């Protein structure tokens, strides 16, 4: 049994301890934003935040989540009330197929939480571990920049 807080809600799951966090999120908790891409920690499609850090949930055993706080894209806002990161990606039309986008947003969210004024180089460096096969990198970069601006405006 593993108890963790996911998007602000406490959950206890009973699964094999080495079950990847990604499987638990998708199959046990019905949170489908994080995607299965490579399953090897190489593409970033499964990225979520654990205690504010971006992690590959496909290679993270759920056992390690005992008492931790997990945030998925569903935790950043809703379709009716999108959060700043989600709004920015919509406004910049940053998605093409969209498969990589939840992971991109979670890694960018973790970056901006610790470095709200990240430079373009810092954003690029941070997102290197998240692959986009459609090639919308320029729009993704603009979206993260816009998200940073929206977050700063919200805080002002
Ligand atoms: Fe986890 Fe590719 S699915 S890094």
Image: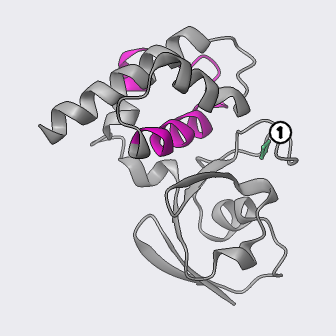
Judge whether 100 appears above or below 78 on screen: above
- Please give the count of numbered marks on the rendered protein: 1
Tell me if I can see residue 93 in this picture: no
Residue in the picture at 63% in, 82% down: 66
Give the magenta part as a residue range: 88-112
Tell me if I can see residue 11 in this picture: yes
Q: Nearer the viewer, residue 50 or 23?
A: 50
What secondary structure characterizes most of the magenta part? helix
Packing grade of label 1 (10 A; few <14, some 14-19, many >=20) is some
> In the image, is residue 106 part of the stretch drawn in magenta?
yes
> In the image, is residue 135 part of the stretch drawn in magenta?
no
Residue on which disc 1 sits: 42
Q: Does any atom of ligand 1 lie closer than 8 Å to the CB of label 1? A: yes
Judge whether 51 appears above or below 73 on screen: below
Judge whether 120 appears above or below 102 on screen: above
Judge whether 151 appears above or below 55 on screen: above
Indicate the quadrant of ligand 1 in the picture. Answer: top right
Residue in the picture at 72% in, 39% down: 44
Q: In the rendered view of the protein, which quadrant contains the N terminus? A: bottom right
Residue 122 shown left or right of residue 85 in the figure: right
Kind of element beneath mark 1? loop
Residue in the picture at 70% in, 14% down: 134
Q: Residue furthest bottom?
A: 1
Residue in the picture at 78% in, 35% down: 43
Residue 93, percent from left and from top = 45, 15
Residue 71, percent from left and from top = 50, 58
Residue 132, percent from left and from top = 70, 22
Q: Nearer the viewer, residue 9 or 59?
A: 59
Q: In the rendered view of the protein, which quadrant contains the C terminus? A: top left
Residue 92, percent from left and from top = 41, 14
Picture quadrant of residue 86: top left
């Amino acid at each position: 049994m593993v108890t963790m807080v996911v998007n602000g809600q406490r959950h206890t799951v009973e699964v094999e301890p080495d079950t990847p966090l990604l499987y638990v999120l998708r199959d046990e908790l019905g949170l489908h934003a994080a995607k299965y891409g490579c399953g090897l920690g190489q593409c970033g499609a499964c990225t979520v935040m654990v205690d504010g850090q971006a992690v590959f949930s496909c290679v993270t055993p759920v056992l390690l989540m005992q008492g931790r706080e997990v945030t998925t894209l569903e935790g950043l806002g809703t379709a009716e009330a999108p959060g700043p990161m989600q709004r920015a990606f919509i406004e910049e039309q940053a998605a093409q197929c969209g498969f990589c986008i939840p992971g991109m947003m979670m890694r960018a969210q973790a970056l901006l939480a610790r470095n709200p004024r990240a430079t373009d180089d810092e954003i690029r460096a941070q997102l290197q571990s998240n692959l986009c096969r459609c090639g919308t990198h320029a729009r993704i970069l603009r979206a993260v920049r816009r998200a940073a601006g929206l977050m700063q405006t919200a805080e002002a």
